[in-house]
Image (tube, rainbow, N blue to C red):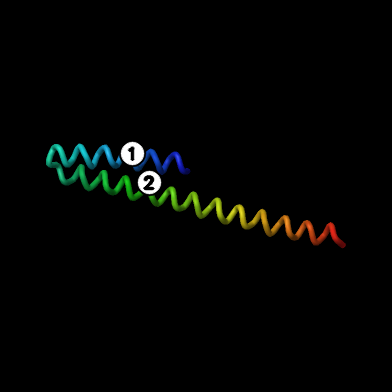
């Protein structure tokens, strides 16, 4: 998801700049929204990875306990 978020951020920045140059507030705002969407996708991807890492850590501890018995 990180690549997808980065793509949205890049696309959004391009739209924002184009809107600013063309004095088109709608395009500029659309670009800002795309950038925000990219940020959200990045944060969700980070959170998903953190949850997955923690789940794997817990599963490993459970397996270690079983192996010790």
Q: In this view, does 65 lie above or below 12?
A: below
* Residue plotted at (18% across, 40% down): 19
Q: Which of 8 and 65 is in front in this view?
A: 65
* Residue plotted at (50% across, 51% down): 46
Spatial separation of the CA atoms under disc 1 and disc 2: 8 Å
* Residue plotted at (40% across, 41% down): 6
Q: Which mark is residue 25?
A: none
Q: In this view, does 49 lie to the left or right of 69?
A: left
Q: Which mark is residue 38?
A: 2
Label 1: few (<14), some (14–19) or many (≥20) C-alpha neighbours in 10 Å: some
Quadrant holding the C terminus: bottom right
Q: In which quarter of the image is residue 66?
A: bottom right
Q: Circle 2 sits in a helix, a strand or a loop, which is it? A: helix
Q: In which quarter of the image is residue 60?
A: bottom right
Q: How many marks?
A: 2
* Residue plotted at (42% across, 48% down): 41
Q: Where is residue 47 in the image (x, y as percent from the top left)?
A: 51, 55
Q: Please give the residue where the numbered disc 1 appears in the rendered image.
A: 10
Circles 1 and 2: CB distance less than 8 Å? yes
Q: Is residue 69 left or right of residue 58?
A: right
Q: Circle 1 sits in a helix, a strand or a loop, which is it? A: helix
Q: Position of residue 64 (x, y in %)?
A: 79, 58
Q: Is residue 54 above or below residue 20?
A: below
Q: In this view, does 50 lie to the left or right of 64?
A: left
Q: In this view, does 17 lie above or below 49?
A: above
Q: Position of residue 7 (x, y in %)?
A: 38, 38
Q: Earlier in the sequence, mark 1 or mark 2?
A: 1
Q: Is residue 39 left or right of residue 53?
A: left
Q: Position of residue 68 (x, y in %)?
A: 85, 60
Q: Please identify the residue farthest to the left as the structure is shown.
A: 23
Q: In this view, does 16 lie above or below 58?
A: above
């Amino acid at each position: 998801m990180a690549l997808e978020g980065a793509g949205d951020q890049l696309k959004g920045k391009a739209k924002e700049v184009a809107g600013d140059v063309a004095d088109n507030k709608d395009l500029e705002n659309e670009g800002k929204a795309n950038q925000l969407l990219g940020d959200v996708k990045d944060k969700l991807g980070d959170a998903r990875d953190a949850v997955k890492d923690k789940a794997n850590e817990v599963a490993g501890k459970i397996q270690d306990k079983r192996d010790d018995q």
